[in-house]
Image: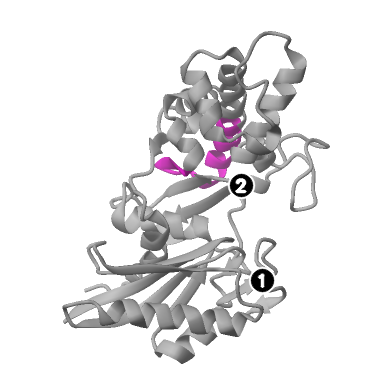
Amino acid sequence: MTEIAIGIDIGGTNTVFGCIDSKGNTIAEGNIPTQTKEHFEDYIEDLIAEINSSLENVETEVCIVGVGIGAPNGSYRTGTIENAANLRWKGTLPIAKMVNEKLNVPVKVTNDANAAALGERIFGGAKNMSDFMVITLGTGLGSGIVVNGDLLYGYEGFAGEVGHIIVRPGGRDCACGRKGCLETYVSATGVKRSVYKLLAKHLGESTLRDIPFNNLNAKMVAEAASEGDSVALETFKYTGKMLGEALANVASVTAPEAIFLFGGLAKAGDLLFDPVKEAMDENMLFLYKDKVKLLPSQLGDDAAILGAAALIWNDEKIVS
């Protein structure tokens, strides 16, 4: 019999899941749309039904040891989703309790960045590390911080919000209601905002100038930069400098062995990594200079479900 953990990643558009063994192999997987049901209870019914259906097609006999869920505003302490901005269901959603009642196995919940950090520790590049950080660079900026081998959750389970460090007081509006948060500058959305600021500042030619804001994405900016577009290149230098300065400050608090960059924006490679590393080195406290590694994540396309499943496989009581 094969023991599996079910990893579930709840996104604003789709919910994906995978049945993952202790080695990180996917035994079965599937997905459902996230937002089609008016009531959260009906969404859970559909999700469990799809999981059970996927397991019926597995040739080997399996035993579910637990369910890990990565969700927006997911709280590890309470097993709930609390007032997620990009979900249609508001208030406090007791998702761990509801899934436990359906499958009768342990259920753990956290946000997507924390899940990515656990995934990196169990299945990725941080297997032998006790102190590290994962920065997820998507629509926003998420972060998962591991200290002394344990994920940093804080009092209510929401610790580690590096994306909401204020780097420019009175700066760009943030969805959190404050101004000048790091993620308004360092994220796919932040890159778009920086491009248009620089286009307004410079009169030179740029392939980005004729692209409407809603059509522009970070991949386009990276492609333009790789072709030598001056505005795109300056955008990545500016973005990398902002991130590197912030990471140098965070490193002074957590003293990580390594910082992993994960997500769509990190796929820009050296365009981002080079200015981030330069700014980190320039601003790092002397105690940590040349000691903190900046690395790309080693988790692939299944990172979200691997990270969620790692919530279960990280439990030493379960892992053999």
The residue lying furthest to the top in this view is 204
Residue placed under numbered mark 2 in the picture: 140
User: At label 2, which amino acid type do we have?
Assistant: Gly
Residue at the image point whose x is 68% and y is 73% from the top: 89
Q: Where does the magenta region start and end?
A: 243-263
111 to the left or right of 293: right
Count of marks placed on residues: 2
Judging from the image, what secondary structure is the residue with disc 1 in? strand
The residue shown at (34%, 81%) is: 53
User: Please, is residue 1 above or below residue 76 in the view?
Assistant: below
Label placed on residue 302: none
Is residue 227 toward the left or the right of residue 25 in the image? right
What residue does disc 1 label? 82
Please provide percent x and percent y for residue 39.
65, 81
In front of the other: 50 or 85: 50
Residue 136 x %, y %? 51, 47
Q: Position of residue 63 (x, y in %)?
A: 25, 83
Amino acid tagged 1? Glu
Residues at marks 2 and 1 touching, judged by CB atoms closer than 8 Å:
no
Residue 246 lies in the magenta-colored region: yes
**Identity of the residue drawn at 68% across and 28% down:** 194
SS under mark 2? loop
Which numbered disc flags the more N-terminal residue, 2 or 1? 1
Looking at the rendered image, the quarter that the C terminus falls into is bottom left
Q: Nearer the viewer, residue 216 or 144?
A: 216
Q: Is residue 288 left or right of residue 300?
A: right
